[in-house]
Amino acid sequence: MVTSICLHRALLGLFFLCLPLLSASEYYRPSNPRLEKAYVALQAWKHSITSDPKGFTENWCGPHVCNYTGVYCAPAPDNPHEFTVAGVDLNHGAIEGTLPEELGLLADLAVFHLNSNKFHGALPSSLECLKLLYELDVSNNQFEGSFPSVVFQLPSLKFLDIRYNRFCGDVPSCVFDLKLDALFINNNQLTFSIPDNIGNSPVSVLVLANNQITGCFPKSIANMHETLRELVILNTGLRACIPPEIGRLDKLRVLDVSYNHLVGPLPESIGGMRKLEQLDVAHNKLSGEIPCSICDLPRLKNFTYSYNYFCGEPPQCLKIRSHDDRKNCIPYRPDQRPPEQCMAFLSKPKYCDSNGCIARPPPPPPPPSSPPPPHHHY
Ligand SMILES: *[C@@H]1O[C@H](CO)[C@@H](O)[C@H](O)[C@H]1NC(C)=O
Ligand SMILES: *[C@@H]1O[C@H](CO)[C@@H](O)[C@H](O)[C@H]1NC(C)=O
C-alpha cells in the first residue's frame, strides 16, 4: 500500500505551502500531477530543514519546482509530454535537517545527491516508492541507525554511496546481490563479516574501508573478476590471510588492504593482476618474500608494503616508481625493524586454513609416550 501512503502524505503536505509569494491562480494550478506531488514533497522537506547556510532552498517556494535550486526536471519516462522531477542535487549544501517521508512522492526521481550536508536521522522508508532511482549518494552526512535496508527495494539502483555517515551494525549480505556498478559504505560504524556471496556483486568499485570487519577473507572474491576495478578494505581490523584466489581479479587497478591484521604470505598469484597500478598492503602482519611476479607487473606504479614482516624482496621491486619497504625484516635495507622484533614475530608463526581464516597453530607434538599402563587381567 505504498502508493496510498504516498498520496496520504501528499494531502497532509498541502498545509505547508509557501502561500505569500504566489497569487491564488498560480497556487491552484501546478503544471501536472507529478509536479504537484513533487511540490508537496519539496515543501515538506523544506520544513524539515533547520539550517541552510548557503541558501540552497531559499527559492523553494511556489509550484514551479523545476526552478528550485538543485531540482532538475525532465520529460517523464512513461510520458514525454509531462515534466517530472528527475534529479535532486544538493551536494555541498551544509544543510541541517532530516529527510521526510514525503520524499517518496518524487516517484520519478533517478538521481538523488546529498553529498556533504548535515542531514541526520534515517533514510525514510518511503524511498521505496522511487522505483526509478539510479544513483543514491547520501555520503558525508550524519545519517545514523542500521544499514538503510530501503535500498533493497530499489530495482533501478546502480550507484550506492553511504560513506562518511554514522550507520552502525550489520551489513546485510544481500547488498552484494544488488546489481550495482559501485558501492561505497566506508567510514561508518558498520560491523560485519565479508559474506561468501560477495562474489555475486557486479560492482567495479567496492570500498569497505574504516568499518569493523570480522571473519575471514572469502576466496569467492575471485568471482568478481569480470567487473572489479577497485577494491579498498583499508583499516577494518580484518584478521585473515589473503586468499590466493584473489589473483583472478585480473581487471583490478587498485588494491588497498592496508591497516588490517592480515597474516601469511602475499600470494604470488597477485602477479596475475595484469592491470594493477596501485597496491597497498602496508601495516599488516604479512611475512615471507615479496613474490617476483608482483614486482614484474607491467603497470604497477605504486607498491606500498611497509610495516609488515617481509624478509625479502626481489631487486625489481626497487625499480617500481613509488615503492615503500620500510619497517620490515629485509636484510641490508634501510629503516627496517630491529632484529628482536623480527625474531619475536617469527617465533610465533600464524597459519590460515583453506578458507583464509587464521587457524590455531598445529598442536605441539605429543609428549614422549609413557609406557602403556599394565593390563590387568581379572
Ligand atoms: C523559472 O525561472 C526563470 C528565470 O528566473 C523564469 O524566467 C521562468 O519564468 C521561471 N519559470 C517558472 C515556471 O516559474
Ligand atoms: C602511493 O601509495 C601510498 C599509499 O597508498 C600513498 O600514500 C602515496 O601517496 C602514493 N604515492 C604516489 C606517488 O602516488
Image (tube, rainbow, N blue to C red):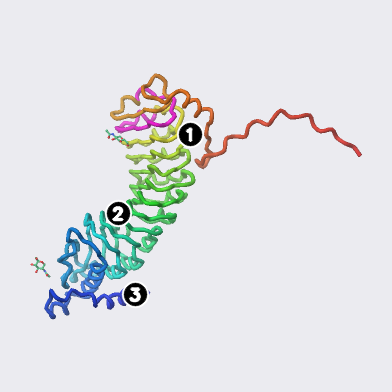
Which contiguous range is marked in magenta?
293-316
**305 falls in the magenta region:** yes
Label 1 crowd bin: few (<14), some (14–19), many (20+), radius 10 Å = many
Instruction: Look at mark 2 in the image and give the residue it sits on.
Output: 139
Measured as percent of width and height from the top left, residue 29 is found at 16, 78
Asked if disc 2 is less than 8 Å from ligand 2, the answer is: no
User: Measuring 39% from the left and 46% from the top, which residue is drawn there?
Assistant: 224
Q: Is residue 122 above or below residue 321?
A: below
Residue under label 3, please give it.
Answer: 5
Residue found 25% across the figure and 67% down from its top: 45
83 up-or-down from 145: above or below? below
Bin the neighbour count of mark 3 within 10 Å (Cα to Cα): few under 14, some 14-19, many 20 and up. Answer: some
Of circles 3 and 2, the one toward us is 2
Observer-nearest of 343 and 252: 343
Name the mark on residue 255.
none
Which kind of residue does numbered mark 3 sit on? Ile
Q: Nearer the viewer, residue 3 or 341?
A: 341
Figure quarter occupied by ligand 2:
top left
Q: Which image quadrant: the C terminus?
A: top right
Residue at the spot x=42%, y=26% of the render? Answer: 337
Residue 103 image offset from top left, x and y in percent? 28, 68
* Front-lying residue, 2 or 19: 19
> What is the distance, in whole Å, between disc 3 and disc 2 at their CAs?
27 Å
Q: Give the SS element for disc 3.
A: helix
Q: Farthest residue in the right direction?
A: 378
Residue at which label 1 appears:
264
Q: Is residue 81 magenta?
A: no
**What separation in Å lies between label 3 and label 1 (alpha carbons)?**
54 Å
Spot occupied by residue 361 in the image (x, y as percentages of width and height): 57, 35
